[in-house]
Amino acid sequence: MKKYRFGLITILVLFILSALVVLPVGKGVIGGRAIELGLDLQGGLHLVYEADLSGVAEADRDSILNGVVDVISNRVNPLGVSEPNIEKQGDNRVVVQLPGTALTDAQKQRIGSTALLVFAELAAEGEEARWENELGRWKPATAEIDGAVKELDSSYFKDNTFLTSDQTTGRIELRFEWNEEGAKISEAVTTRILGKRMGIFEGDTALLGDNGQPIAPVVEGIISTSGVITGLSFNEAEILSRQLNAGRLPVPLEIIYENTVSPVLGADFVDRSVLAGAVGVILVMIFMTAFYRLPGFLSSLALMVYIAIVLAIYKLVPVTLTLAGIGGFILSIGMAVDANVLIFERMKEELRARRTVGAAIEAGFSRAWTAIWDSNVTTLIVCAILVWVGGSVAAGAPVQGFALTLGVGVLSSMFTAMFVTRTFLRMLIGSQTARKLSLFTTEAGDQNA
């Protein structure tokens, strides 16, 4: 019994440290952080954008997609989102998770828009036009610089656009500054269309003012170094300014999947999940103790150690816990008990063969290990496949959450079954308790251990 005290001390220390990480539930004494909840539990927005890489060389696609992630991150941060998650998915998708945030349709489009303002001039009769609205037919405003024809657009802006208000009229002004090349193009264009309208387009649509009308001011002077866009509402101008300063996307994006969960619904999920998990654990402990007597009770204690360890891992890694992830965690509890069932059934067979309790314990663990190993490894393989599949589909986050929590639970359950439960039972060898077969099996009688 004494030679197993080190193992028992190790378990107690591990349990106490894990409990300090987990409790209190809000932050924990160690680590100082709460378990991260997924969008389905705390509410928020899950968006999947698909990038049009048809015009990008195969060798450049990965770097282009990395650039998309960087630009979207710069755009999302000013929205005040707490810990947004923006990452690549597959070869041409970007996943944007904004916990606790509700965005308007316009903001969602803003996140994925190219953020390229193109300045336009009215097309003459017979000329090809790119846009058309109530003010006329429009073509990009161009100028020949160093022998090349170039369009005037916001790619020549410096990253220092800002808002002011006209002191006389109080109108919001979006001020921008051209770089050296943009200044040359702007000077040539505004010189040519002086006294005429200049349209401003973003993508396929005209930039609209706060009155809902296209913004197309009359050029009243030659613009070479800086300019002003007026007519925007304050919110629209502020968002556009941030977006322009964050940079423009190198390729077009399209929203292909969207899921929104309200915080109230998420909180209800958490309460119900915690209740379901607690009821499940209590029922499992009652069953194990009633059916397997003392070993079942000790496995219930090991189950408490298992739960503390897994929750501590979730906090420290960290693992984002979703509703599907909670399902994987609860399922892993059942698998942890399943390993103990295999061990205890083997122990009962050894006791029926009139072996001592100590020998039955060792034989039960050693002979059940093969079955435990095979079943858990096959489960881990399935978890790996689910993680891979979840990463290749638009709505794969719940699949990945389930697989990740189940995989962590399976690995932890192998440890608690083969080390924690085993140590608890070994502590009984040589004690008076081990002489009472009624505590280990339905067969009565005493026996030397």
Image (cartoon, grey):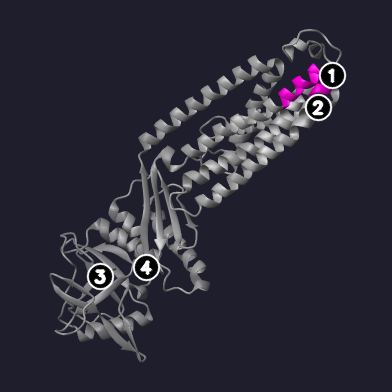
Residue farthest top in this picture: 445
Disc 4 versus disc 1: distance between alpha carbons?
82 Å
Q: Is residue 127 visible?
A: yes
Q: Residue at x 37, y 91 (%)?
A: 146
Mark nearer the viewer, 4 or 2: 2
Q: Amino acid at mark 3?
A: Phe
Disc 1 versus disc 2: distance between alpha carbons?
10 Å
User: Does residue 367 show up magenta in the picture?
Assistant: no
- Most frequent secondary structure within the magenta stretch: helix
Disc 4 versus disc 2: distance between alpha carbons?
73 Å
Of labels 1 and 3, earlier in sequence is: 3
Secondary structure state at the residue bearing disc 2: helix
Q: Nearer the viewer, residue 260 or 31?
A: 260
Q: Amino acid at mark 2?
A: Ala
Disc 3 versus disc 4: distance between alpha carbons?
20 Å
Q: Residue at x 31, y 88 (%)?
A: 144
**Residue 201 tag number:** 3
> Which residue corresponds to mark 2?
363
> Which residue corresponds to mark 1?
355
Is residue 223 left or right of 364 when viewed as pictured?
A: left
Q: Residue at x 37, y 81 (%)?
A: 180
Disc 1 versus disc 3: distance between alpha carbons?
86 Å
Mark 4–mark 1 CB contact (< 8 Å): no
Secondary structure state at the residue bearing disc 3: strand
Of labels 1 and 2, earlier in sequence is: 1
> Which residue corresponds to mark 4?
160
Specify start and end residues of the magenta stretch as a single range.
343-361
Q: Is residue 28 visible?
A: no
Disc 2 versus disc 3: distance between alpha carbons?
77 Å
x then y, percent, for residue 289: 65, 16
Mark 1–mark 2 CB contact (< 8 Å): yes
